[in-house]
Image (cartoon, coloured by chain):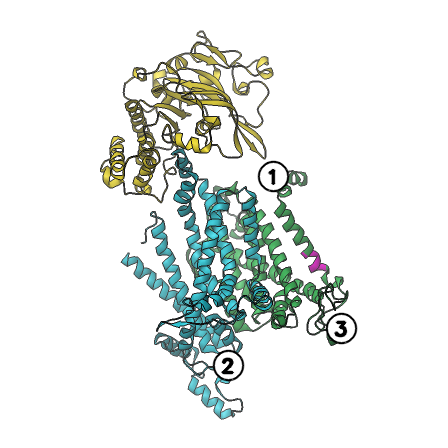
Chain colours: A green, B yellow, C cyan
Amino acid sequence: MAAGFLSSEFVHNYKRNASAIAGSLILVVFALIVVAGPLMVAQNPYDIAQLDLMDAFKPPMWLEGGEARFPFGTDGQGRDVLAGILYGTRVSVLIGLSAMAMSCVIGTTLGLLAGFYGGRLDAVIMRIADIQLSFPSMLIALFLMSAFGTGIDKVLISLTAVGWVVYARTVRGSTLSEVQKEYIQAARVAGLRDGKIIRRHILPNVMTPLIVVATVQVGTFILIEASLSFLGVGVPITEPSLGLLIKNGFDVLFSGLWWTSVFPGIVIMALVFGINLFGDFLRDELNPRLK
Amino acid sequence: MTATPALEAVSPKEIPAKTGAPLLAVEGLRTWFHTFSGTVKAVDGVSFALRPGEIMGLVGESGGGKSVVGFSILGLIDPPGRIEDGRILFEGRNLAGLSEAELRQIRGRDIAMVFQDPMTSLNPLHTVGRQMDEMLQLHTDLDAAARRARCIEMLESVGISRAADRLSAYPHQFSGGMRQRVVIAIAMLARPKLVIADEPTTALDVTIQAQILKLMRRQIRDNGTAMILVTHDLAVVSEMADHITVLYCGKVVERGPTDDVIRRPAHPYTRGLIDSIPDPAHRQPRLKQIPGAVPDIRKLPKGCSFKDRCFRAQALCGEQVPELVVQGDRAHACHFPLTEGDSR
Amino acid sequence: MLGYTIKRLLQMIFVLWIVSVIVFLMMSFTGDPVFMVIPIDSTEAEIAQAREILGLNNSLIEQYAVFLKGILQGDFGRSYVYRQPALDLILERLPATFEIVLVAIVLAAVVAIPLGVYAGANPNRASSRAIMSASLLGISLPSFWVGMMLIFLLAVQWQMFPSSGRGDTVDLGWFRTSLLTADGWHHILLPALTLSLGTMAIILRMTRAGMMEVMRQDYIKFARAKGVSRRGMLYGHGLRNAMIPVVTIFGLQLGDLIAFATITETIFAWPGLGKLLIDSIYRADRPVIVVYLMLVAVLFVVINFLVDIIYTWIDPRITVK
């Protein structure tokens, strides 16, 4: 099995695809940051006891006045920008991943139910999905956050509320075509319970297209979360994500203190770019129509 | 395919101008596709010739490389495909050596093509008139009114009524058979010298097939056009073609005048194809199919590609690839060809 | 056609009604508007009186009825902050947002479609790969950060462009536009570019995907067999077919632009709807938020309807019914 995978066309194409390799390398780096980020820096940027106002607004270390302690400089409270980024990346990535997982579970479940049972349930779920899809995700999330107030949990709820639709639609479509197939009919005739048919037979067959959707969605969610936080309706100041770091940097940008916003921006770009590079490769590989 | 489309009893032999220099001579054509899982030698050393006004049947099972021959002639092979070797002499010019711009002058004007599926070969967003007019704009100096008149005349000649009105219709407003008539009309518009018809009736209803074949033959005859009829259906070829070239796994296995080949096939593969024609005229007791399937063309067995399906295969067939043996107007590539004595 | 329009109209009204219910419920369950309208030092009695006047003591259904009646009469209440009708505030800001979105989408289409056609027609060229990588970067960039960087470099450091505001405008009576003055264009370029980047990348990718799909079709090969030139094949036969999926996302992209205009307008202090919305969210200026949402809902529903109509123009196979 493992040997078969390693010699498969998928792996072969991966090895020849520079952007897929670049994308996955970026993702490996970010995985390390998420797991061990806080261990890489001395300062905990959110422990006020460790901050010193004397260190405020130090430029990056290679500029005049910079210090090796703060390679990317410090913000107005003497907080190490690098430390802020490492902690913030964690928040951003975890929000993206959790919201994706929640959307995927809820959307897939609803899609399976709609596709398998059809009828009124299907009509209601799909009608909601249709209406929701005619509005931009960003706006729905913004509206929900403005009603809820800031908080990581609320960001997660808002992102899930906009994210489930794409899974529900995809899964419903594949379920509909799967239900028609003879082996499902046979399983039904054989008296297998619906739950079992759905889990054992339909679910595994509708998962593949979701892999691409899920990968790309993590990137989208990270960007939406950053935008919400930038607007001040995302994560709270006590648990800043990359987006909130950029917002804080924006307030001092006009005074020429660029490093507090430039570096978090580059990091978020690299992160989402890595996700999209890899997602692009997956899309080409998993979509048999393009072969 | 099931029943053979019955054609009117005009023998193809009556076509004039079948002597003299060939219109098209394909010599040792090799068109290969370089894919991840290996090189697909879709066409591997194919030769044949065609005189003006002749109809040649290019026969074989699907996957035998027949269509690739047609596309190679027009220079329509896209990567990963490539013409590796061979010459395609059309009126003495080697098409395989021409630039894209030079080929464009030949496509449509000298050599036209009819595709298999009329449902997909017309642009869904353009009117039929526009798609016809395009051909004339590209290849004639006619003014708009003359082009329109020619289009109407052509549509009528392929049996489409109210032709003037139909020019402004879209393809989706036509049935499959009607669309194939339009495709044929487009192909014949610029009065080409050669038409390559790639399975022109395969996608159509059986009842429509006969009509379309009849129409094609009349068009070909009226215009003195030559035709390569690419098909898997030997029955169609036997009714239409002057001579036959049989392809198997990218190679010519048999070639010769239609009646002769049908009456006394030399290659067991040809014999198999003939035996699987469900035609009561041949009075065989029951339909025979060739056992097995076309092998994976990327992993051809050593020796003769057909040996695993052949009832006459012997040790030599596994050792050595049979060469094409030419005898007069017949040719075959078999170590143990059938003779008159091997009656069915 | 008439039947179709009526059917769509009913659907649109249904969607708008659903939106009004959702907006109303969300507003009712979050925060207490009474504290937005009374002075801070109000007594209990004054608060109670204000509640009574605002109708907050009635049942939700009754409150919704009042809310809906107001909407239908174009009366969304007064802004708590600006003390003027919320609808007027929104309408006053509408042109600025309309312009920035218009310039952004035109910019996106003009850049993206030719590049997408090129990349789709020559998928294996190095230049196509570069275009695709750039477009992937385009959808990976946080647009607010791009805006900030543009401001920092082009406005603050090199002072080539103004960093905020809308510049000189011309009053056309019903519409105040900045697109008729050089100063207006000078002001709109940076925010419109910022706004358009994401959409540009997505239209490019859709055009390319559509083009690649179309290039595989038989009718393209048939056109080539007719002797059609490469250019004629790409633009005469390919592009219109490839545009069908692009039109689908055009509507959605327009929606996204309106949504993301909130951020762009905030960064560039562009006096449009988006900035008004964000300011109103900060100040819990509920009536303004409600008008904004209802207006945007109407816009999206109309855009979707128009997209369906445009479909039938592009694709003769689709008929409205």
Q: Is residue A90 above or below residue A188?
A: below
In front: label 1 or label 3: 3
Which of the two residues, A175 or B42, is positioned nearer the viewer here? B42
* Residue C24 visible in the picture: no
Using residue B183 as the reference point, say whether residue C210 is left or right of it. Answer: right
In the picture, the quarter occupied by the C terminus of chain B is top left
- Where does label 3 land, which residue? A50
Question: Residue C267 is drawn in which quadrant?
Answer: bottom right
Chain letter of mark 2 equals C
State the image coordinates of residue C321 (x, y, percent, origin top left).
31, 54
Same chain for labels 2 and 3? Say yes or no: no
What amino acid does circle 1 point to? Glu
Q: Identify the mark at residue C32; answer none if there is no mark.
A: 2
Contact check, label 2 and label 1, Cβ < 8 Å: no
Question: Residue B89 is drawn in which quadrant?
Answer: top left
The residues tagged by marks 1 and 3 sit, at their Cα atoms, a distance apart of: 52 Å
The residues tagged by marks 2 and 1 sit, at their Cα atoms, a distance apart of: 60 Å
Mark 3 burial class by Cα count in 10 Å: few <14, some 14-19, many 20+: few
